[in-house]
């Protein structure tokens, strides 16, 4: 975990550092508990928990839309603005992997889905770095007030046989080692539901 990510927590950890390791793990619990409450509300921005991503999947007519909301930590291993050349390279590599979304989100072939658009956005990263054609002046590149930052990705596919869509293999765990869990919500004409994907268990059943 990056030492620059949790400055306030880090300073409180320093106070605890002389005491037992048990206290160190307890220090993290309020963060996780608060995030859980946010998740259950289904309102506003998704909870920011390192290792956890949120994926919304919607099939509307022939258009299959996916929205990924993830801490940048899962994708590049840091959440500060990409100042160094190495940081910028890491962000560009991440963006290129996400833009090749046909390999990350693989529908069963009978559905005939092909990638039509990708949009990436992050408060901590400039649009150009993410491969976006910036139309507006670049947003201020900084992490949130608490030192955390997310990435939002929108991915659209056009499916020639949407009624034959049964499943999607989600390749985020293989592409980005920072993911430990992905919470999915999906809606199709036939059903809606939720699923929790894990490394090695990343086949999303849409039926
Ligand atoms: Zn964070």
Image: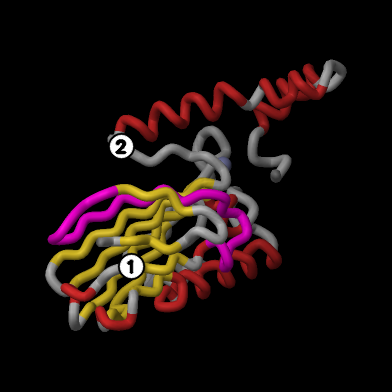
Residue 17 as seen in the image, left or right of residue 190: right
Q: Earlier in the sequence, mark 2 or mark 1?
A: 2
**Label 2 crowd (10 A; few <14 / some 14-19 / many >=20):** few
166 to 153, vertically: above or below: below
Name the spot of residue 161 as percent of width and height, x first: 18, 80
Name the spot of residue 2 as percent of width and height, x first: 70, 45
Q: Residue at x 40, y 26 (%)?
A: 37
Asked if the magenta segment contains residue 47, the reply would be no
**Residue 140 at least partly seen:** no
What whole-number distance in Å separates the C-alpha atoms at marks 2 and 1?
28 Å
Q: On the image, which quarter does residue 200 sit in?
A: bottom right
Name the spot of residue 94 as percent of width and height, x first: 55, 67
User: Which quadrant of the frame does ligand 1 lie within?
Assistant: top right
Asked if the magenta segment contains residue 184, the reply would be yes
Query: In the drawing, what numbered circle is on residue 21?
Result: none
Residue closest to the far right: 18
**Label 1 crowd (10 A; few <14 / some 14-19 / many >=20):** some
Q: Residue at x 32, y 48 (%)?
A: 194
User: Which quarter of the rendered picture does the N terminus lie within?
Assistant: top right
Label 1: state its secondary structure: strand
Residue 14 as seen in the image, left or right of residue 144: right
**Residue 21 at least partly seen:** yes
Q: Which residue is at the front of the view, 138 or 129?
A: 129
Residue numbers of the magenta segment: 173-193
User: Which quarter of the rendered picture does the C terminus lie within?
Assistant: bottom left
Q: Which residue is mark 2?
A: 44
69 to 157, vertically: above or below: above
15 to 126, vertically: above or below: above
Q: Which residue is mark 1?
A: 167
Name the spot of residue 113 as percent of width and height, x first: 28, 79
């Amino acid at each position: 975990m990056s030492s620059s990510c949790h400055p306030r927590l880090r300073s409180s950890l320093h106070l605890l550092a002389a005491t037992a390791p048990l206290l160190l793990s307890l220090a993290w619990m309020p963060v996780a508990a608060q995030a859980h409450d946010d998740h259950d509300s289904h309102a506003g921005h998704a909870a920011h928990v390192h290792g956890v991503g949120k994926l919304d999947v919607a099939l509307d007519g022939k258009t299959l839309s996916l929205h990924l909301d993830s801490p940048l930590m899962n994708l590049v291993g840091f959440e500060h603005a990409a100042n160094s050349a190495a940081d910028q390279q890491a962000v560009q590599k991440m963006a290129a992997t996400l833009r090749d979304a046909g390999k990350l989100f693989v529908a069963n072939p009978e559905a005939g889905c092909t990638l039509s658009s990708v949009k990436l956005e992050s408060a901590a990263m400039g649009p150009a770095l993410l491969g976006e054609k910036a139309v507006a002046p670049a947003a201020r590149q900084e992490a949130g007030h608490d030192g955390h930052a997310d990435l939002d990705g929108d991915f659209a596919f056009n499916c020639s046989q949407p009624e034959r869509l049964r499943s999607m293999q989600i390749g985020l765990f293989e592409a980005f080692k920072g993911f430990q869990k992905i919470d999915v919500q999906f809606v199709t004409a036939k059903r809606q539901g939720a699923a929790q994907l894990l490394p090695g268990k990343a086949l999303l059943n849409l039926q």
